[in-house]
């Protein structure tokens, strides 16, 4: 026979369910009270709180301006509905949050290193904030305009009418990319996005440096020519200096050439300098419109310098008086 202890059934004590706590609402600029109220209702349903319990516990999840508002109006907040209406009416300018979500949705693009699913859920969340009744084709349009370039090119050939199809084809493309064995010889970015969406300045700088190095390598390899036995010209000297400066980024070391002497450079053939005949003197400057001569001395028209009276008077005044007497006598 079983003993008395064996006959007693085992007593199972139910484990107490651990409560969940919502986040704290402070009423700071940028905090959406409607989002916080949805989160609070979700936690209240999990904790099995009724309206009285929600109102009794809400004080412990308020801080800053929101808690001070609750303390100042605690007597008027006699029900949970009154609290929600007062909180959303004071801190919930819905138009302001909608405009901010619209601005974010316009410029939202997939960032470098961001997964496709993270980008999709972020855009869908912004669409929900802008318009909860937004059509599927509008959501697809917002998703397409900011997705990574490689995925965008692959989706152009697909017929996508709703977000479910968009997510399905994105997952398919990601799976195909992971199954690839070979990688291209040159890959500038693993996840190319529009340059306007690059927020990290270091990524853009490193990309530019990589492209410049590869272009310089290509140009240096194409311009390498065989050495000539003749002495170097000035053009070759300039080319050697450029190659020496680009040596740190060059894949092949350039051969050192002996520096030419002055005598070797001067022996090279130089084309004679072409001499042009001097331009003829412009005589029309000292002629009037009716072809009368203009005096070089006084600048008056009608006579030349040889017969200029002012010039003659100057010479006469410079002579001594004895010579003037002899001339008149």
Image: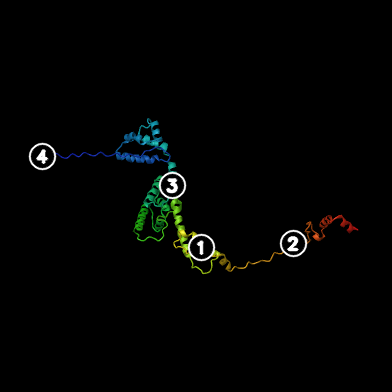
Q: CA distance from mark 2 to mark 3?
A: 76 Å
- Which of the 4 image quadrants contains residue 182? bottom left
Image location of residue 33, percent across then percent down: 39, 39
Residue labelled with disc 4: 3
Label 2 SS? helix
The quadrant of the picture occupied by the N terminus is: top left
Circle 4/circle 2 CB separation < 8 Å: no
Q: Is residue 136 left or right of residue 285?
A: left
Local secondary structure at mark 1: helix
Q: CA distance from mark 1 to mark 3?
A: 53 Å
**Camera-nearest label, 1 or 2:** 1
| Mark in front: 4 vs 2 | 2
Of callouts 4 and 2, the N-terminal one: 4
- Tell me, yes or no, whether the two marked residues, 1 and 2, touch with CB atoms within 8 Å: no
- Residue beneath the point at 42% across and 36% down: 90
Q: Nearer the viewer, mark 4 or mark 1?
A: 1
Give the left or right position of residue 127, taking residue 230 as reference: left
The residue to which callout 1 is attached is 240
Q: Residue at x 44, y 54 (%)?
A: 206
**Residue tagged by mark 2?**
284
Q: Which residue is mark 3?
A: 104
């Amino acid at each position: 026979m079983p003993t008395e202890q064996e006959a007693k059934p085992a007593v199972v004590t139910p484990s107490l369910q651990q409560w969940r706590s919502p986040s704290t609402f402070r009423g700071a600029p940028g905090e959406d009270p409607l989002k916080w109220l949805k989160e609070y209702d979700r936690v209240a349903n999990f904790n099995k709180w009724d309206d009285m319990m929600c109102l009794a516990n809400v004080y412990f999840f308020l801080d800053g301006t929101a808690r001070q508002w609750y303390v100042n109006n605690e007597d008027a907040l006699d029900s949970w509905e009154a609290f929600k209406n007062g909180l959303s009416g004071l801190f919930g300018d819905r138009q302001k949050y909608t405009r901010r979500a619209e601005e974010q949705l316009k410029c939202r693009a997939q960032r470098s290193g961001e997964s496709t699913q993270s980008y999709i859920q972020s855009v869908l969340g912004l669409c929900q904030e802008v318009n909860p009744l937004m059509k599927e084709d509008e959501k697809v349009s917002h998703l397409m305009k900011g997705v990574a370039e490689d995925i965008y090119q692959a989706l152009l050939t697909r017929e996508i009418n709703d977000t479910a199809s968009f997510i399905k084809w994105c997952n398919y493309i990601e799976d195909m990319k992971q199954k690839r064995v070979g990688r291209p010889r040159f890959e500038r970015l693993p996840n190319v996005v529009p340059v306007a969406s690059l927020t990290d300045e270091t990524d853009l700088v490193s990309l530019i440096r990589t492209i410049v190095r590869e272009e310089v390598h290509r140009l240096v390899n194409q311009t390498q020519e065989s050495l000539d036995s003749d002495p170097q010209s000035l053009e070759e000297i300039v080319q050697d200096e450029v190659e020496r400066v680009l040596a740190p980024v060059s894949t092949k070391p350039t051969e050192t050439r002996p520096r030419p002497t002055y005598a070797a450079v001067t022996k090279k053939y130089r084309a004679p300098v072409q001499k042009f005949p001097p331009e003829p003197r412009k005589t029309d400057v000292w002629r009037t419109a009716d072809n009368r001569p203009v005096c070089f001395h006084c600048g008056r028209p009608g006579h030349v310098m040889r017969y200029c009276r002012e010039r003659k008077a100057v010479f006469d005044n410079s002579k001594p008086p004895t010579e003037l007497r002899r001339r008149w006598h």
